[in-house]
Image (tube, rainbow, N blue to C red):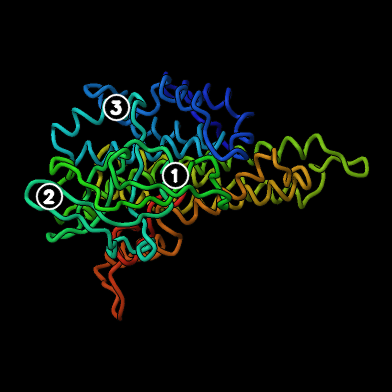
Amino acid sequence: MIPSGSRGSALVQAAADLADALRDRAAGWELRGALPEDVRRAVAQAGLLGAAVPRGHGGAEARQAELGEISAHLGGACSSLRGLFTVQSMVAAALLRWGTEDQRAHWLPLLAGGERIAGFAATEQEAGSALAHVGSRVEDDGRQLVVTGRKRWITFGQTADVFLVLGRSAGGPVAVLVEGDRPGVRREPVSGQLGMRAAEIAHVEFDDVVVPRENRVAPEGAGLSHVAATALDHGRFTVAWGCVGMAEACIADATEHAVRRTQGGVPLAGHQLVGSLLARSAVGTDAARQLSCRAAELRTGSDLRAMTATIVAKYAAARAAVEASRSAVQILGSAGCGPESRAGRFFRDAKVMEIIEGSPQAAELHIADRMFRQHGLRPSGPGPRPTAPGTSAAGAGQEVSA
């Protein structure tokens, strides 16, 4: 039996209540291609955008397990809604760990309260699964920074107030905060993508955008291995839990339909093949939840195994969401193919979840590499040594549709 999401803390309860209240509206805003402004306000007023931010900076300082359950509740309602929570907390996590005291004091309260919406600008035409190859330039003339480049598939890129931009400087990879209203920032809205259609995706061009030197996050050379890696690790964790929520929602919808729908006078639930589809989905989803719980536990203790545990959880949860949504659409039949179908929407979203924040293939390379190292072995042969997905040529890019 699939365990329902926890509602233990006040913050998790707020996420559950919000998801319950908004669930029936999600299909509409996905068709329109944007989250309504009142939905954004509701997420902020519930304190969810500041869940990962310390209380001293206006946040709730939630535990890792709470962040996971919040992601599951939001993910079970709408992936774009969960995407807002994810990208906001990704940028906040990077600033919390690597930002200066002034950067944290200025930006974290604004992000926590929803007064500013963040975007993570990393992916490029030639650097999606290989972020080490980003071509965007950040020039330092001694007085200010000049940012030039074109980023793709930026979650909430159409409306983000500030972007955390990954680029390259003379000293190596660098991360820079770029306000969205600065001259030279141009946005190209993307619509009709496979999934997460309300996440306001955009390609964003930075044409000689001038920002203060104080906007650089961490020293030159640390932009990818430190700043972007922290953001991606946090993103993988919330995506994993969001996939658990998606899978659980699909199983619930399919099970209810199988019990109520009759065919030839026999409930669908009476057909063994239907039960088999549901059972496989239930086992995969339950396993993904347990792996996500393990990742939360290791992250709480800053265990060195936490990063790999997070990658494993995201890998398993994305697979579970794919299987559960596919089976749900199959069981629901024509009802699963309609524009209002949650299972149909999650069927599209789930494939996107497999790709973003580290593809399955990149995750497999990372997991296998850690297995070999536990036995004191290093694989021989050509090719780069796998590291965390999204931080090397072996990795996969950022939230394509967060």
Residue shown at 36%/56% (left/top)?
123
Along the viewing direction, whichever of 140 and 354 lies nearer the viewer: 140
Image spot of residue 24 (x, y percent): 64, 29
Image spot of residue 83 (x, y percent): 45, 40
Along the viewing direction, whichever of 367 and 58 lies nearer the viewer: 58
Residue with the mark numbered 3? 110
- The reply to whether discs 1 and 3 touch (Cβ–Cβ < 8 Å) is no
Mark 2 lies on a secondary structure that is loop
Q: Is residue 100 left or right of residue 15?
A: left
Residue extending farthest to the right is 264
Say which of marks 1 and 2 sits in front: 2
Q: Is residue 296 left or right of residue 109?
A: right
In the picture, the disc for residue 219 is 2
Residue shown at 34%/46% (left/top)?
120
Image spot of residue 276 (x, y percent): 71, 51
Residue with the mark numbered 1? 239
Q: Quadrant of residue 128?
A: bottom left
Mark 1 lies on a secondary structure that is helix
Q: Amino acid at mark 2?
A: Pro
